[in-house]
Amino acid sequence: MKKTSKIYIAGHKGLVGSAINKKLKESGFTNIVGKTSRELDLLDATATEKFFQQEKPEYVFLAAAYVGGIMANNTYRADFIYRNLQIQQNVIYNAYKYGAKKLLFLGSTCIYPKNANQPMNENELLTHELEYTNEPYAIAKIAGLKMCESFNIQYGTNFLSVMPTNLYGPNDNFDLEKSHVLPAMIRKIFLSKSLMENNWEGIRADLEKRPVEKNDGHTSNEEIVLLLKKYGVFSGKVELWGTGEPMREFLWSEDMAEACIFIMDNVDFKDLAQNKKEIQNTHINIGTGKDLTIKNLSKIIAKTLDYKGEILFDASKPNGTMRKLVDVTKLNDLGWKHNIEIEDGIKKISDWYLEN
């Protein structure tokens, strides 16, 4: 990419898209295009085509997606498969139709089978059944990477796919129902600590910034206590889903952004497809190659926030896949490695959350 190349970031306000946007600007790129969902609904095929026809971006980062944690994935199954398929096919097809030089599609490591060999390398794809709770989202992401491969094979495009592990960082989603485990845990522990300390000013400020079930903090203390109880948040006690034994890997979102820009600049589809009789599994895992249990994650967050209360686990709720550690050999061999370790990252995201 040249500093003046027109670059479109689909999802430029989201967790990864905002990090890519920030890194590109810091690196001196001057022609970056971003549209909010209100300005451009990527579910709308006509609107998406009109955008590509007018803007004709040279490089596309497809970071827009409908995402959430285990609870949201299992509850809104139709939304997760429909919305993600629509977004992907509209952006990928129009990037091809209007001559984008390169596209980078962001998927997820939930594409891998629930019983995949650990750590999961790219060849584990489609070797076994998926984890039930996020199956619709996983199928949508598999379709996206296969769409990129198929357009490359048939039309000679240069569309790449990356599969990041669990991401966290600035502009993360802290919704108590729909967010991923790490940001949800930070918020729950903060709210529980605030209840312990009778910090109602902090609780109301939190709810005003991020309402829960339309409660923006302008209700009685009793109503807020009942609402938070529904999400496992009590004074001096937090209840989390599952046993706490599943292991998860986490990558700082700005590390993810650096990896995406590195791949866009240094890797082509032909590099990934060479020496393959059948061209498949050309996607690239992005992660740290390190994981920890959810229980240990909660301990690090509690220590970071100086939380003295209890953390309990509800074993009647689903665990999800027991382990999802990615093999990052391909990525490391291409020349990129992560920078931020989990302890430092939790301190950074906790500080960001408290400041925002």
Image (cartoon, rainbow, N blue to C red):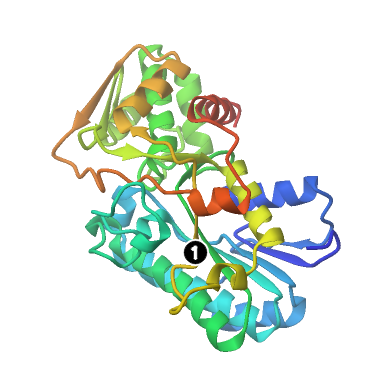
Q: Is residue 319 left or right of residue 21?
A: left
> What number of labels is visible?
1
| Position in image of residue 30 (x %, y %) | 84, 57
Determine whether, in the image, residue 22 is placed left or right of residue 248: right
Which residue occupies 46% across, 34% down?
207
> Image quarter for residue 169?
top right
Asked whether residue 79 is in view, the answer is: no
Residue in the image at 25% along x and 43% along y: 322
Identify the secondary structure beneath mark 1: loop
Outermost residue to the front: 275
Quarter the C terminus occupies: top right
Residue 354 is left or right of residue 81, and the answer is: right
214 shown above or below 349: below
Residue at x 55% of width, y 67% of height: 272
Q: Amino acid at mark 1?
A: His
To which residue does mark 1 refer? Answer: 283
The x and y percentages for residue 336 are 61, 47
Quadrant in which the N terminus is drawn: bottom right
Q: Residue furthest left?
A: 316
Closer to the camera in the image, 165 or 315: 165
Q: Residues within 10 Å of mark 1 (few under 14, many from 20)?
A: many
Residue 208 in percent (x, y) is at 51, 35
User: What's the residue at 51%, 76% (across, down)?
Assistant: 149
**x%, y% of residue 152?**
57, 80
Question: Does the rendering let one see residue 265?
Answer: yes
